[in-house]
Amino acid sequence: MSHIVTAPLVGVNGADGKVKYLYQGTEVPSDVSREDVDRLVADGLVSAVGEAPKAATKRTAGVKSDSAPAAARED
């Protein structure tokens, strides 16, 4: 089964040991290991052809957990 990159950019290791950079919409080459493809699918970075893309986990910058403690902030 072939897979398509859904993330803006993904780096994968080919069978030749070289890193390949794949842009969104690119088909994942057949020399990428099944384990790598499974990991990329689980992370929402690629999806099987014909599947709806899975949303990748995102963290928003500046959320409360990223800010300084209230005592350290100047008002």
Image (cartoon, grey):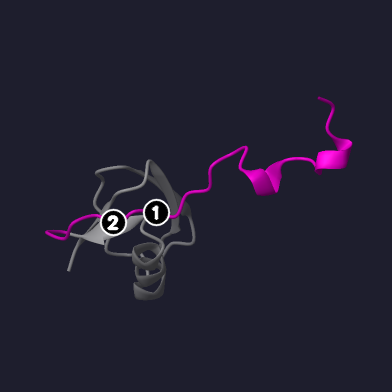
**Residue on which the image places disc 2:** 28
Residue at 35 percent across and 71 percent down: it is 38
Q: Which amino acid does label 2 sit on?
A: Val
Q: Judge whether 52 appears above or below 39 on screen.
A: above
Residue 56's tag is 1
Over which residues does the magenta segment extend? 49-75
Q: Where is residue 60 in the image (x, y as percent from the top left)?
A: 53, 42
Residue at 68 percent across and 49 percent down: it is 65
Q: Position of residue 47 (x, y in %)?
A: 25, 59
Residue at 44 percent across and 55 percent down: it is 57
Residue 6 vs residue 12, the one in the foreground = 6
The residue at the far right in this view is 72
Side of 26 where 19 appears, left or right: right
Residue at 33 percent across and 54 percent down: it is 55
Side of 37 where 13 appears, left or right: right
Residue 64 vs residue 3, the one in the foreground = 64
